[in-house]
Image (cartoon, coloured by chain):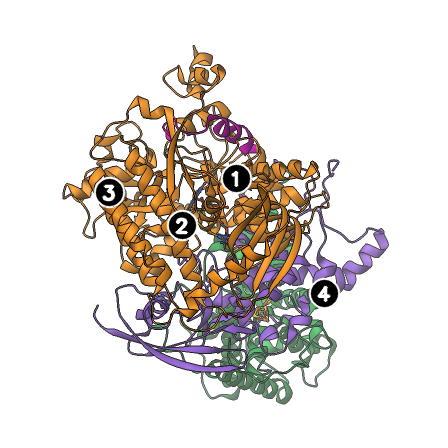
Chain colours: A green, B orange, C purple
Amino acid sequence: MAQPLEQTTTAKTPKAKSKTRPYWVEPVVTMTVLGVWVLYSLWEVLFHNSGTYHNYISPYFSPGVGEWFGWHVLDALYVAWVPLVFRFSCYYYRREYYRGFFWDPPGCAAADKPRPRYSGETKWPLAFNNLHRYAWFLVLIVLIFLWKDAVEAFFFKNGFGVGVGSLILLVNAVLLTFYSFSCHAFRHMVGGDKDCYSCDGKPTTSYKLWQRVSRWNVFHGTWAWASLASVWAADLYIRLLMMGVIHDVRLF
Amino acid sequence: MGKESYESLDYDVIVIGAGGAGLRAAVEVSENTGLKVAVITKSLLGKAHTVMAEGGAAASFGNVEAQDGWETHFYDTMRGGHFINNYRMAEIHAKESPDRVLELENWGAVFDRTPEGRIMQRAFGAHSFRRLCHIGDRTGLELIRTMQYKAIHTGIEVYQEVTMTKLLVQDGRVAGAFGYLRSDGRFVLFRARAVILATGGWGKIFKVTSNSWESTGDGAALAFRAGVDLMDMEMVQFHPTGMVWPPGVRGLLVTEGVRGEGGLLRNAEGERFMKTYDPERMELSSRDVVARSIFKEVQAGRGSPHGGAWLDISHKGPDYVKAKLPGMYEQFRTLADLDITKEPFEVAPTCHYTMGGVRVDAETCATSIPGLFAAGEVACGLHGANRLGGNSLSDLLVFGRRAGLGAREYLSQSVDWAQVDESELDAEMDRVLEPFHRPGGVNPYHVHEELQAIMTEHASIMRSGDVLQAGLEKLLALKEMVPKMSIDGSRVYNPGWHAVFDVENMLLLCEGIVKSALERKESRGAHWRTDYPDELPQWQEINFVESFDGENIRLRTEPVKAMPENLTKLFSYGKAPGLVAREGKES
Amino acid sequence: MGEEFRLSVWRGDPSGGQEVEYRVPGETGMVVLDALQYIQHNQAPDLAVRWNCKAAHCGSCGAEVNGQPKLLCKTRMDDYVGETVSVKPMQTFPIIKDLVTDVSWNYQVAKEIPPLDPMYPAPFQMQQVDATRVQEFHRCIECFLCQDTCHVLRNHEGQQQYFGPRFMVKIAEYEMHPIDGADRLPLLADQAGLGMCNVTKCCTEVCPQHIRITDNAIIPLKERVADRYYDPVKILLRRLSGKKAGPTQTPSRSST
Ligand SMILES: Cc1cc2nc3c(=O)[nH]c(=O)nc-3n(C[C@H](O)[C@H](O)[C@H](O)COP(=O)(O)OP(=O)(O)OC[C@H]3O[C@@H](n4cnc5c(N)ncnc54)[C@H](O)[C@@H]3O)c2cc1C
Ligand code: SF4
Ligand code: SF4
Ligand code: FES
Ligand code: FES
């Protein structure tokens, strides 16, 4: 019987686990990577007004809300906050930034100065993380556009084709889909809130869906990092194209 | 020595032991009765030996095989016990265990399910049908955790890490118990109108054992000293499959569930040797038979590299094994670097259960001292010469409850607290503190190791008259060490000090074991004498009963109670009653 | 194996203590508890260490080995070849002596949790798929290693405000039980302090029973609490429909 809930993600290798790194290594790495990403995003969002290169559009600028309404100041701002809020309230990123930025805790069972004033997620603004589900709905809308962009990335002026950019945007859409659909809030909505899947007789669709999402959810952290990297890569690729630093390679 | 002080607490009922039996008894006494109940345990709540039980609890629901019923369960239990069981206990047990298991479900236990959504049952040695209600291979954990949470919500007070060293009896009835707090060494007196013993067995008398450190037989020894009779002491069960390698885990249990789920036993030559010993039931024969068979194979030179047999479940496939035996998978992976879903592993007999113990009344679990009750492994009678797997967990529930009811009924005759004799307490405190005042004496751990060595050599799975006799002499010599054991350090959480009393208790019981093993001149169930290899009908009529006068153990025989006719009839078909009924329907 | 292991064991009481070094002859497959017992039997009979089963079943032997919360009976010495193995008591709980700590706080918390309240008496009709979900939580051996590592309890003196991961698992066990009819969300939102947990998952990392505490117990409970207390739409809908907050499904309760 398959029991995804029962398996551990970190298959423990019996040997050679004792030479542990100092506890601060992990939070410092997290802090650096996330920090650089945030700085990059700020630069991208605050200093550019367009993310379109022919049939490619950067995920930071999609959908083009500014264009729809004819606003042309800081175009990315109208949408970029959605994935930002989504990631900020994501249970996985919460783990990362509480550990990395707040040092609550810096490492497990690590020495830490007692800080009795800690209030967890009970107070504003962190209590807002409890509304993560709404960020999920918003991001769903964005995701639909990203898929549209990914498809359009295969249709060049002269018809169907495949460029490196098309592939990057496709991979990005796939990874974001896995990331969004392995979300804890989504897992809750599709059936996690139920206590009984079989009380009406046979296990329901809800059970099957929940089971599938649970299976993806095990790797939610992986999807989180992978999709972060792919968004970054997609944007950077398009930005460099636009700046004329590199040229798109058409595969056929 | 300055006069020691002690704390004094009054309860209607105290229950010594927080295993399955103790907790079930306590719940029965306290729920909706307004009685003040305390449970006392040597360890933390929820850690008692019961937590280790793996395979399941036997109850004849017939969820998987509908022919099952209490008659067949009774039949299997009596046959498994080689007919020296107390038939009435076996009958009560078979009839009541399904209700007790359902009670657990009500209180939060979540058993594995059948496709119809009922409690799943697995096959186990010598049970005619699939009868063991289980949760993977951690049924004991489920049982004790459920009982623990039930208990704390019925207003029972739990005293954790408190060791009782003496049962108090005054004017022929129970007055309470006396002991000390392990955490700081202070003394404490529990005055009680009734006392329920549920202290478990004494499997720690052997080195190779599946038992936890608590199984030192305290309750049986305390009761024995207080004047209660012990019975069937020669009957010590060896579980056929304990871990063998590496040395640190030797004896650790490999649940019978492995065989229940289809595991196969092979010798070094790759042969399924059980076909020579029990061709019909093969691996699922009763424990005494399988244990002896492995032992014989090893003796005949067909053992595995570290002196055992090979057990193999890998043909069931990794998914199945991991779902049904997750604990076993984990145990071998972390402790033996071995993947049981891929390869066979070595097993050998390990001391597992003590069928003997405090002699009790089947209906109420009352002992011969008014106000003193006993249930669980410390009591005796249900299992006879050999316990069937899974019959202990149900025993705990059935007779735990019965002991609770017994105590309640006893109290309803408005008994008051008995007086406690101060001088007796002073003497006890002196005795308990004495090891601190004997500098440079004998290390209690070493006495324990010596005791285990003697029992292993002289009174283990294979016994004979001369060897037992020699063992008895060694035990008596070892007894001389008791007043010499000494220990350093303070009274605060001092395990060396605690070990002194464990050893004393075990020594007393070991003497009892060897004495009755010497007298039972036949082989029956777990008791295997090479000088009397056959099961003899005249011995089926008697139990050995022992009493203690403070100096010597006296042995006598008592006739086994005869079954009434409606029960004897169940044995007249030559097969399990459930099977008879089925054939009856088919024809 | 012949080689020798070096252990540095914390010895002391509430007034203080220090690490003491011991040497123990190695044996194949030895666990830290074996080494400590060797010390106890041969060098320091009064060395206090809690254990019961020595089989990773009972959860008595939690301590910190080289700074990591571990079960002593499940941690192999040969994981630390060539190192001095430091063994310390769990830091979150008050010391009694040596490696033994006072974990009684946990037992007090346990009493605060309302037990299972079945909607009808057993035998329950329940499929394995539903059982499987809660059975994960039933694996808990109450070793309290998760409580030890949880920074809310360990660093923020959160005992007054948070029950700790072990008891989130316990509450999840009841809350997700298909037949349970009680409502523990108010408890979770308030006294049990679910909001104090910031899902940083240290508890999951140390759990010797591999219970996915954060993902399968805490986060789903947080989502349920959000349904009840944070989600404005759900709150509004409940107001409008006049439904009382309570368990989502309410099969008729047979008379109790
Ligand atoms: C590894 C293993 C697996 C098993 N598997 C199964 C199985 O699958 N099915 C089955 O039916 N049976 C099984 N058994 C047998 C069964 O678990 C035990 O027989 C049963 O748990 C005994 O329960 P108990 O309540 O009598 O006592 P225990 O659980 O042994 O509890 C004894 C209690 O008494 C307390 N105590 C003892 N002495 C004192 C004292 N001096 N002062 C204060 N308190 C004291 C202890 O602290 C403890 O709380 C297994 C046994 C083992 C070892
Ligand atoms: S995830 Fe929550 S409960 Fe677990 S250790 Fe972190 S803060 Fe504590
Ligand atoms: S949840 Fe895991 S770590 Fe916490 S007490 Fe239970 S078994 Fe131990
Ligand atoms: S939990 Fe990470 S996206 Fe929702
Ligand atoms: S001694 Fe039982 S878990 Fe380690």
Tell me which amino acid carries mark 4: Gln
Q: Which residue is mark 3?
A: B469
Mark number for residue B322?
A: 2
Tell me which amino acid carries mark 2: Lys
Q: Secondary structure at mark 1?
A: loop
Q: Nearer the viewer, mark 3 or mark 4?
A: 3
User: Are discs 3 and 4 both within one chain?
Assistant: no
Residue B87 highlighted magenta (yes or no): yes
State which quarter of the image contains the C terminus of chain A.
bottom left
Tell me if residue A197 comes above or below residue C93 in the rendering: above
- Magenta span: chief secondary structure: helix
Mark number for residue C191?
A: 4
State which quarter of the image contains the N terminus of chain A.
top left
Q: Chain of mark 2?
A: B
User: Farthest left residue?
Assistant: B301
Q: Chain of mark 4?
A: C
Q: Chain of mark 3?
A: B
- Characterize the local packing of mark 3: few (<14), some (14-19) or many (20 or more) Cα atoms within 10 angstroms: some
Q: Which residues are magenta?
A: B80-98
Tell me which amino acid carries mark 1: Arg
Alpha carbon distance from label 3 to label 4: 64 Å
Alpha carbon distance from label 1 to label 3: 51 Å
Say which residue appears at 61% left-offset and 52% top-offset.
B420
Q: Is residue A118 left or right of residue B339?
A: right
Q: Is residue A151 visible?
A: no
